[in-house]
Amino acid sequence: MGSNIKDPLELPCGLVLPNRLVKAAMAEGLAEKKHLPGTRIFSVYEQWAKGGWGALLTGNVQVDVRHLGGYGDLATREYQGDEEDALNAWRKYANTCQQNGTPAIAQICHPGRQSPRGAGERGFFEKTIAPSEIALDIGNGLAATIVRNIVFGVPQAMSHFDIDRVIAQFVGCARILAQCSFSGIEIHAAHGYLLSQFLSEKSNTREDQYGGSAERRARIILEIIHQIRKAVPKTFCIGIKLNSADHSRSDFEDTMTQIRLFSEANVDFLEISGGTYEDPTMMGRGLQNETSDTENSRTQSREAFFLDFATETRKRFPKLILMVTGGFRTRKGIEAALKSGVCDLVGIGRPAVLNADFPRLMMDDDVYSDRQAQALFSKVPLPLLARLLKIRMLGGGAETQYFRAQIHRVAAGNAPQPP
Ligand SMILES: Cc1cc2nc3c(=O)[nH]c(=O)nc-3n(C[C@H](O)[C@H](O)[C@H](O)COP(=O)(O)O)c2cc1C
C-alpha cells in the first residue's frame, strides 16, 4: 500500500507526476507590472525546473487584482485589450516550469480578510471581504489591536453578489491558467485565506446557504470546483489545500465532513497543511512552539507537522490522494511517511528554497548516504520587537520574509543563504 519517493503517481485526471516530491507553494513576491509573471520569477523557476521534482506548485496566484495577499503577488484578471501580452506571460511561466517535463500546478487564492491595506488595486480605505464581519485576532494587547486595525481592519461581510463574483474569479483564473498550458490548479483553502475563512465556524457565522453547518460552509468551494471542471479540459488537475484540525478539537468532525464533500467532488489531490496568520503552525511557529523552541532550533521536534491528521484522513478516505506539507527535512522521514501509506506525496517548502535540487539529494542514494540526505537549518530568529509586542503572526512572518528574500536572491542570480 505504501510508496517510494521515486515512484511515479497518476492522478485521477490522468496527470502523471514522475515522483513523490512536490515543491510546495511559496508566494514569491516577484510580480511585474499588472501583477504578471516576468523574467525574475522565470529565473527562479528555471532552477526548480532542473531539480527533478514530481511537480512544481507555484506560489499563490490571486484571483482578484483588488485583493492581494502581499504586495508582489501574481494575479489574473479578465484581460481586455492587453490580453495577448498577458496570456504570453502566463504561457511563458508555465513553459519555464515544465521545460524538463515536470508538471506545473498553479495555486489559486483569495486572501479575504488577510489582505493587508495597500495590497491590491482596491482603495486604501476600502475594506477587505470575508464571510462575516469578524476581524483577525493576531494577538493580545494594545499593540496587536493597533497593528490589526491599521494593517487589516474589519472585513465587510460578503453579499451573494460578492460570493458569485469570487466564484467567477476562481473559475476565470483556472480557465486562463489551463489555456496557458499549466497542468492544473490547486485551490488554496488553507492558512486562513478567504476559502478557509468560509470553512471555519470561527470566521463564518452566516445563516444563509453558505454558513451554519460544515456542509454549507464548504458550499462556496464545491461550487468553485464544479464550475472549474466545466471550464477546463478533463485532463486538467484540480487539487485543494486544507488546514488540518486536531482530533481533540470540536471542529475535527466538521473538517472530516468537508473532506468527504471535496473527495466526492473528485478533487485530484488534497494537500494537508495548517495554521493561519493568527497561529502560524505551518511554519512550525504556532502558539505552542513560539515559547519553548530555543534549545532545539536546529532540529525539528517531529519530522512532519501534520502527519497525525493525515493518518486519520487516510483511514476514512483511503482512495483520496494525500499530500502532506510542513517540516519534512530528511530522506528517512520522507520515506517513512510514504512507505507507511499515510500520504502519497510530500510537499517541500523552505528546503526547496535553499536547495532547488533537493529531490536529487533525496533520490540519488548512490551519491548521498542517508546521513547526507537531509536539509537541517536554524529557525529564523524572531525580532525582539515582535516578541515584545506579542503579535503571533510575526513568528510565521519572519520565516516567510526570510525565505522570500532568499527567493529574491535566486531571482537576482545569487545563491540562497540558510538562516
Ligand atoms: C516564502 C514562503 C511563502 C509561502 N507562500 C505560500 C503560498 O503562497 N501558499 C501556500 O499554500 N503556502 C505558502 N507557504 C507555506 C508553504 O507552502 C509550506 O506550507 C510551509 O513552508 C511549510 O513547509 P516547509 O516546512 O517544508 O517549509 C509559504 C512559505 C514560505 C516560506
Image (cartoon, rainbow, N blue to C red):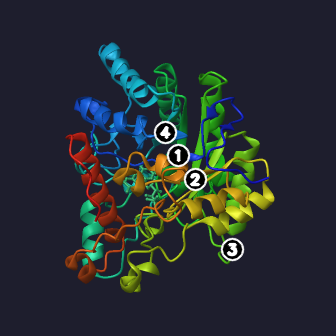
Question: Which numbered disc flags the more N-terminal residue, 3 or 2?
Answer: 3
**What crowding class fits label 1: few (fewer than 14 Cα within 10 Å), some (14-19), or many (20 or more)?**
many
Question: Which numbered disc flags the more N-terminal residue, 3 or 4?
Answer: 4
Q: Mark 2 and 4 residues: CB-CB less than 8 Å, in contact?
A: no
Q: Nearer the viewer, mark 1 or mark 4?
A: 4
Q: Mark 3 and 4 residues: CB-CB less than 8 Å, in contact?
A: no
Q: Nearer the viewer, mark 3 or mark 4?
A: 4
Read off the residue under disc 2.
Answer: 346
- Label 3 to label 2, Cα distance in Å? 22 Å
Which mark identifies residue 196?
A: none
- Label 2 to label 1, Cα distance in Å? 6 Å
- Which structural element holds mark 3? loop
Identity of the amino acid at label 4? Gly
Side of 225 where 185 appears, left or right: left
Read off the residue under disc 1.
Answer: 22
Measured as percent of width and height from the top left, residue 382 is found at 28, 74
Measured as percent of width and height from the top left, residue 141 is found at 30, 82
Q: Nearer the viewer, mark 3 or mark 1?
A: 1
Total labels drawn: 4
Q: Which residue is at 42% across, 34% downward?
A: 49
Identity of the amino acid at label 3? His
Measured as percent of width and height from the top left, residue 221 is found at 61, 44
Read off the residue under disc 4.
Answer: 52
Measured as percent of width and height from the top left, residue 236 is found at 61, 27
Q: Mark 2 and 1 residues: CB-CB less than 8 Å, in contact?
A: yes
Side of 285 where 316 appears, left or right: right
Q: Nearer the viewer, mark 2 or mark 4?
A: 4
Identity of the amino acid at label 2? Val
- Label 3 to label 1, Cα distance in Å? 26 Å
Identity of the amino acid at label 1? Val
Residue 338 is drawn in which quadrant? bottom right
Q: Mark 1 and 4 residues: CB-CB less than 8 Å, in contact?
A: no
